[in-house]
Amino acid sequence: MLTINNLSIKYGHTSVVDNLNLQLAGDELLMLVGPTGCGKSTILKALAGLIPIAQGEICHQQWTANVKQHVAPEKRNVGMVFQDFALFPHLSVEKNITFRLTDQSEAERWINTLGLQALRHVKPSNLSGGQKQRVALARTLAHQPAFILLDEPLSNLDAALKDNLRWEIRAALKTAGIPAIWVTHDQEEALSVGDRIGVLRAGKLEQIDKPEFCYNHPTNRFVARFLGEVNFISTQVILGKNLVVPELGFEQAMDKNILNKCVDLLLRPEDLTIHGDINGKGKILAKRYEGSSRLYHVKINNNVVKVRTHHEVNLKEGQSVSLTVTSTKPITVFEEA
Amino acid sequence: MTRWPLSYSISLAITLLAFFPVIILFTLASDSVQMFDVRNLNILRNTLLLMLFTAAGSVIIGVPLALLLTYVQIPWRRFWLILLAAPLALPSYLGAFTFYAAFGQGGEIENVFGITTPSVNGLFGSSLIMTLYTYPFVLLSTRAALSSLDASQVYAARTLGMSLLSSIWYVALPRIRNGIAAGTLLAAMYALSDFGTPAIMGLDTFTREIYVEYNAFGLSQAAMLSLQLLVLVVLMLYLESKFKGSQEPPGRHLTFWPNRWQANLLLLTTLPVVILAIVLPLAIFFLWLWREGSGGFDISYALNSAYASMLAAIFAVLLALPLACAAVKGTIGRIMERITFIGFGIPGIVMGTTLVYAGLQLPFLYQTLALLILAYVLRFLPLAVSAIRSSTESLDNSLVNAARVLGASPKEAYRRITLPLTMRGIVAGAALVFLEVMRELPATLLLGPIEFETLATYLWRVYEAGYFGKAAIPGLILIFISGLGLTIMFSTERWNNVNSNEGSQR
């Protein structure tokens, strides 16, 4: 098990990561997601022992690293897949994979599993982006690390390639049964492949939980916005302990009493449906065609609400509409900003 | 992790060693009776005029050639580029030697064609030779600047109603001023520190006078002159550093497609330069070879040159490795690396003077090969450092990190990843030092052990004795070696950059 306690990292006097706590065990795949510059890659470098830490400790069964006791990267038994693949350009695919291996069988296993048989003697410069990524993954897995760190492994690849590779990488990690931390700035990637996701902002972990929970019940507006398109609908209509929004045909029992307070409801565009309604209180301000779906911007009372529908629902700009909440899950409520 | 790296400690020792000649120079000059006299004034005037004419001449030749070779699609463009940059690789004393022998009454031109030509010597001769062998500095730096200049600015000027020539004059040229200035200062610095050309042309400059004083056992006076020369060199180095690094990011550059006769006409205008700088020296050496054969040339001179060059190259690389490593690591390392560049700024004749004095103080070193190698290493160390540093810098740090997380210790990562991937830079650095040392004249003249004749010193003795015909073989070997140097120069990073710009524009 990998345990990180109160980890802080500084570049000079600038704090990059602040008081991070998390644990990783079994064959879990943890996605660390956040905007550029939030400290994601820095955390990985610190876990690998490539940069010093300013506070806290990183513990593994075989070693503990802290401010006083640095453990060199080669002593940590860690695997790392780099953003730019970091394949040794002067070595063939096979020699990259067997870099420090005494037992060649692990190399053979991953060469076969990841379909690299035909590329054994090829130099990295002659590989495509996807092939490079497979070789980098095979090299890491063949060395049988205790845990694996993946630093934006798909960011240098085409969109079409990314989709397939993210599943391939997940499957390989699960086959190996090795826990991994995968850093990405792509929230879709994080939500789709991770067992858990941790959302980072400016070096702080804002929320860590299962992807669905983070998406539906973000702890704050930043997490809500970062994980997908969102509406914050301000309302004051509260009767007793029930939250009622008549214009959306919506009523929900509240677990805490926020009677007569202004609140914002968190509704994703896909939580709502739209109907053409001459008496509707909403009006379509704009619409956007997205291929499989359409996104409408609807003005209703003082809110502009985004609604995503199937692409076949084709209403006109300026048309009067009514909106309904279709989601059956409990709606997250934030006190008004 | 934040401890003082080993490469810093080694670099510090090398930096102190590099500073050693300057300290000696100050010690030695303090014994000088006279700091400056009327004769100095004449030397200063000659030196400054030579520098000025060389700078002006190299701009007049270098800038139009750069425009031609960057913007105009002439046939065999790469060939012309290499040919016109080639004089840079030739030591100018070879040109001076052959010009001295070819022109004037009784010169080889008169012997062969029966036409009497005026002599080429003095300030005019020195400036002409210097210009012919230094204009490639301006050509290359201007070309690099032009390559990175975005053509859309010129197109914009033209759509606003400017003619093509006006738009180049008003829009393109002002933006490459720094590139031109950087090349011009390098040319001026070469003129300032070269010994062979003014010595052969009979022009009293600092370098020639230092040699005269040295031969007259006036070591202190030679040191005082060296210090004065060093002040000018430092000034030039300072100016040069101001004009560096001002290049714009590469853009799509202008291309003109001349028709066949226009292209031929343009190439014809470059012929005088090619004839004077390359064809004439080659022709003269071949003439002597045909007329006098090997002329008693002893192969041991070439072997001595190669032996000394090889030792210098090995030691330079050994010292350059930790320096390059330190330079990549951080600011202190970079500062130490810059300090070792002093050696490159110290003219060969000055380096010779200081180490002769050091040899006199340490008799076990005096007139030994070791002292000569030390002079070479101190002078040409920056060539090795630059080549190794640029290949180390271009090494992706994540490769070493990848090796470390795969379980390799720092030593193993260096041996298996860093070293093989920077080998190209190491070999290029060693080769550049080797070739420079093969051609080096003034320090070898002053420091060479007795009866240790090299190609350059043999050529010098032949010139002094007036047996020009004997210069054929060493001259041709030196030209061949210079050609090799050119090949390496073209394959180094700076050249690759120019080419990659070209590639992006296709």
Image (spheres, coloured by chain):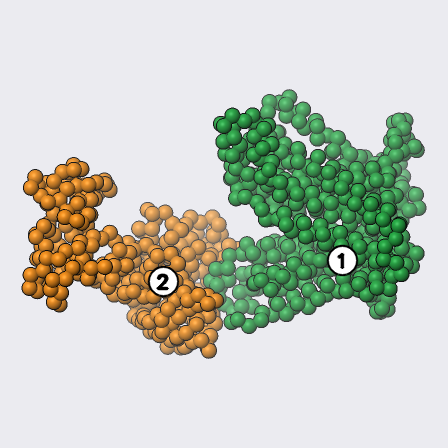
The disc label shown at residue A202, or none = 2
Front: mark 2 or 1: 2
Q: Residue at x 86, y 64 (%)?
A: B31
In the image, B45 versus A227, the foreground residue is B45
Question: How far separated are the C-alphas under marks 2 and 1?
Answer: 53 Å
Return the residue at label 1: B376
Image height check: is B413 above or below A1? above
Q: Disc 1 sits on a residue from what chain?
A: B
Asked where in the image residue A44 lies, by quadrant, the reply is bottom left
What's the colour of chain A in the image? orange
Image height check: is A335 above or below B264? below
Whole-percent x, y for residue B177 in the image: 62, 40
Q: Disc 2 sits on a residue from what chain?
A: A
Q: Residue at x 33, y 51 (%)?
A: A162
Please tell me whether mark 1 sits on a helix, a strand or a loop: helix
Please state if B144 lies on the left or on the right of A27 as rendered: right
In the image, B68 versus B101, the foreground residue is B68
In the image, B111 versus B276, the foreground residue is B276
Can see residue B348?
A: no
Q: Residue at x 48, y 50 (%)?
A: A125
Tags 2 and 1 in contact by the CB under 8 Å rule?
A: no
Please state if B139 lies on the left or on the right of A40 as rendered: right
In green, which chain?
B
Instruction: Say which amino acid is labelled 2.
Output: Ala
Packing grade of label 2 (10 A; few <14, some 14-19, many >=20) is: some
